[in-house]
Image (tube, rainbow, N blue to C red):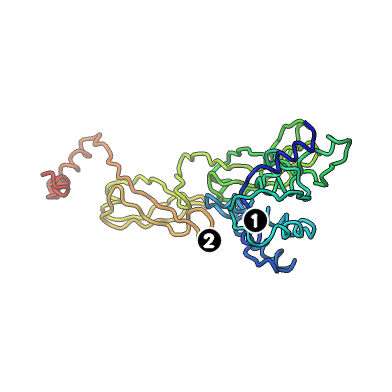
């Protein structure tokens, strides 16, 4: 099949129209400066490194796709020529004789929509036609490469730099990765231009999904930290001051008299960093020592005689 036949078949494919002005929140009469300002605002709002909403990455791609067209005077002129009556998401087919720069129908190598790929995408690699792209498209940037990085809770709390070794078709290479303070498991760190290389030699982005290892002492609960703290019966009954570990070092916690097992005390701002910072919750566990000597047993007997205390009655089981 000839390239012309492939292009003709692709152009007959129906797809959803993309209203790039609506995506950017600007009128069709917007100036280049207004378009650029809108892009910067929305890109910051939806960047996956800063926005953890489920659809943030899709919105970021849509904003980037719109900017790719509207920032280019030639592409914008061709896009505007389609007319102003189309609605976002409406079924669309390029008009006969469309002379846009895209070859379309090749799986969205740029990561943009079928609409973009058909009208403005790369289509063929330059090498398919003796180094020339007959459709005037530029080499598409490879799709992002994904990988996982496992870090400790201390790494996330403090924010550290890690050195990774990556292996690909061009051999092994090392990159430095800054772990942002307060990042959560499942969030991604985007490293621009550090992914795998495409046929043109240009590298795509690398998306590192963060996996925080379980900790021996602390339990991560969103932005909060939870820790179990054993205490003696007399510390709970009389009240006490305990040295409690936190990720930033030990602090003194005041236990009120009459504390009970399962009671949680809050250390404000001692959780994961952020705006606002999380808290640390200390859950008390009363541990009763065994009576291993006669004197210890007699002490328990005197306590039993001194207190008219039945814990089962308090739970309604007496």
CB under 8 Å between discs 2 and 1: no
- The circle drawn on residue 275 is 2
Circle nearer the N terminus (2, 1): 1
Residue 29 vs 301, above or below: the answer is below
Q: Nearer the viewer, residue 273 or 108?
A: 108
- The circle drawn on residue 63 is 1
Residue 176, can we see it? no
- For residue 131, what is the image quadrant? top right
Circle 2 packing at 10 Å, graded few (<14), some (14-19), many (20+), is: few
Q: Nearer the viewer, residue 161 or 135?
A: 135
Q: Nearer the viewer, residue 194 or 5?
A: 5
For the C terminus, the image quarter is: top left
State the SS at label 2.
Answer: loop
Name which residue lies at 59% across and 56% down: 88
Provide residue 11's location: percent of width, then percent of height.
Answer: 71, 43
Q: CA distance from mark 2 to mark 1?
A: 26 Å
Provide residue 77's location: percent of width, then percent of height.
Answer: 76, 60
| Disc nearest the viewer among 2 and 1 | 1
- For residue 194, what is the image quadrant? top right
- For residue 186, what is the image quadrant? top right
Residue 202, can we see it? yes
- The circle drawn on residue 157 is none
Circle 1 packing at 10 Å, graded few (<14), some (14-19), many (20+), is: many
Name which residue lies at 39% across and 51% down: 282
Q: Is residue 5 left or right of residue 183?
A: right
Q: Nearer the viewer, residue 111 or 20?
A: 20
């Amino acid at each position: 099949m000839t390239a012309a036949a492939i292009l003709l078949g692709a152009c007959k494919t129906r797809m959803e129209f993309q209203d790039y002005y609506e995506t950017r929140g600007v009128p069709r009469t917007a100036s280049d400066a207004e378009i650029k300002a809108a892009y910067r605002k929305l890109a910051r709002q939806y960047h996956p490194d800063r926005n953890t909403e489920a659809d943030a990455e899709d919105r970021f791609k849509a904003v980037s796709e719109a900017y790719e067209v509207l920032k280019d005077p030639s592409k914008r002129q061709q896009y505007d020529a389609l007319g102003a009556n189309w609605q976002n998401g409406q079924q669309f087919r390029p008009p006969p004789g469309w002379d846009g720069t895209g070859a379309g129908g090749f799986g969205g190598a740029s990561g943009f929509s079928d609409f973009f790929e058909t009208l403005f995408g790369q289509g063929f690699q330059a090498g398919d036609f003796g180094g020339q792209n007959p459709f005037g498209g530029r080499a598409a940037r490879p799709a992002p490469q994904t990988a996982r990085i496992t870090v400790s809770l201390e790494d996330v709390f403090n924010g550290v730099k890690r050195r990774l070794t990556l292996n690909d078709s061009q051999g092994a290479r090392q990159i430095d990765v800054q772990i942002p303070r307060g990042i959560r498991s499942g969030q991604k760190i985007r490293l621009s231009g550090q992914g795998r290389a495409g046929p043109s030699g240009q590298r795509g982005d690398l998306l590192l999904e963060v996996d925080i290892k379980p900790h021996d002492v602390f339990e991560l609960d969103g932005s909060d930290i939870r820790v179990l703290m054993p205490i003696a019966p007399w510390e709970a009954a009389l009240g006490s001051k305990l040295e409690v570990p936190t990720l930033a070092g030990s602090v003194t916690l005041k236990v009120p008299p009459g504390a009970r097992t399962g009671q949680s005390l809050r250390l404000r701002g001692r959780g994961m960093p952020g705006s606002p910072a999380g808290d640390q919750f200390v859950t008390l566990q009363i541990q009763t020592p065994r009576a291993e000597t006669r004197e210890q047993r007699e002490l328990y007997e005197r306590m039993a005689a001194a207190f008219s205390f039945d814990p089962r009655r308090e739970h309604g089981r007496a």
